[in-house]
Amino acid sequence: MDENRTGEKRTDGIRTDGTRTGEDHIRTGEDHTEPDHVEQDRPHPGDPAPRPAPRPRSRRRRLLRIAAALLALLLLPLLTAETALRLNYTGDPAPGTRTRHQDALWLGHAWVDGRKTDRDVEVLARRLRGTGIRDLYVHAGPLEHDGTLPASAYPKARRLIAAVHRELPGVRVQAWLGDKLASESPDGLRLERAATRAAIVTSARQILAAGFEGTHFDLEPLHSGDRDYLSLLDDLRDLTHARGAVLSVAAHQIDPLPALHSFAGTTTGHPKWWSQAYFGQVARRVDQIAVMSYDTMQPLQSLYGGYVAQQTSLALEVTPESTGLLMGLPFYHENRFGHWAHAETVPAAVRGVRLGLSRTDAGRARFGVALYVDFAATEADWRAYREDWVATPPTAS
């Protein structure tokens, strides 16, 4: 853009009527004709210094100022929120805020496709004895995009279930079923189709017939307010309760800031979080709800732990006491956008869980943690779970 000078354009020493300025050049009573060439007046030593022409304003500088102001407006709420999370991580957990023997463990597909044997179950049992693990979510899917589930996906399920009951009496084995939803892309499972929801219920029926004691659903990305999902849960609850089985779900995190899911959905197309009200609607329809309280984008252990404490409190506030609430622990170590292994640690998560439980409902009986996932866990993860949450020495192998 051309830069414009300010002020009125003029020629120094010449009036607009063409007459000279400075010393009188018209003699009294004497005719005078203006010469053809008029010399410009030289500056007089007593005259004030001429004012410099104003410098052009820089468009780039203005844009930078505007950008800085907008950035400050965006960062201020973020910095405020992060400070609140850090404060949320302070203090001491209340005594007794440890395992209530309602914990769960996600297990990979190898346990039902033949790769794992009875010997592996024995090793797993030695690790789990003396902990708070009550439920195993064993991956038996994924579902097809039309909601169906081929029996070939879990050929060794009965053998696994029998071995677990033999080695770990009282531990339930649930089928972990899931699929990618077509909520953010054209490819995936479509809950808005009645036929798809009916097929999912049929898949749950055949899983229970195979000996599983419950169904654990993980459908992502599931947007807050999805009524078709609630309708599906109503149908699944009727089925599982009629069979004396458990209906369990993996849940998205709750808005850490008011209506953050709406803002994220508008700006990125990926809402990520659920509203607290929607979380409560889901929790009232199931027997267990496990919060996927990892992949939080937090860069420090203290911020991650404070985030988990906040999520624990938010979930406790809207989960009925008749529903088991579990908070997810990160038993994996990836570094990618949204997850930093050095920040999202088991000790930080457990401390956050205990702080949130202490502040909101320290006596909640149906409460636990869910460990994700067996095949990525390290000895340090298991040790932190035992020492910080179970407080029980490991059983000798």
Image (cartoon, grey):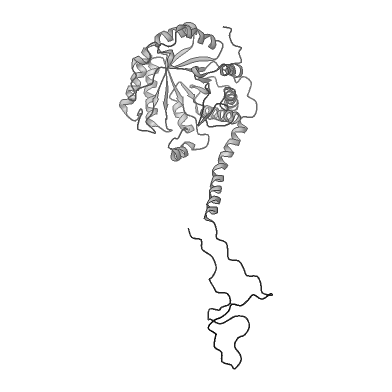
Residue 208: image quadrant is top left
Q: Residue at x 50, y 14 (%)?
A: 134
Q: Looking at the image, which residue sits at the far right? A: 46
Residue 87 lies left or right of residue 245; in this view the side is: right
Image location (x, y in percent) of residue 343: 57, 28
Q: Which residue lies furthest to the bottom in this view?
A: 29
Residue 354 screen position, x and y as percent: 59, 24
Q: Looking at this rendering, what residue extends furthest in the left direction?
A: 195
Residue in the image at 35% along x and 21% along y: 201
Q: Where is residue 259 in the image (x, y as percent from the top left)?
A: 48, 38
Task: Say which quarter of the image contains residue 265.
Answer: top left
Quadrant showing the C terminus: top right
Q: How many marks are shown on the rendered structure?
A: 0
Q: Which residue is drawn at 54% across and 43% down?
A: 74
In the rendered image, the vertical position of residue 134 relative to residue 348, given as above or below: above
Where 67 sits versus 280, above or below? below
Q: Where is residue 293 in the image (x, y as percent from the top left)?
A: 52, 27
Q: Residue 177 lies in what quarter of the image?
A: top left
Q: Which residue is drawn at 64% across and 20% down?
A: 95
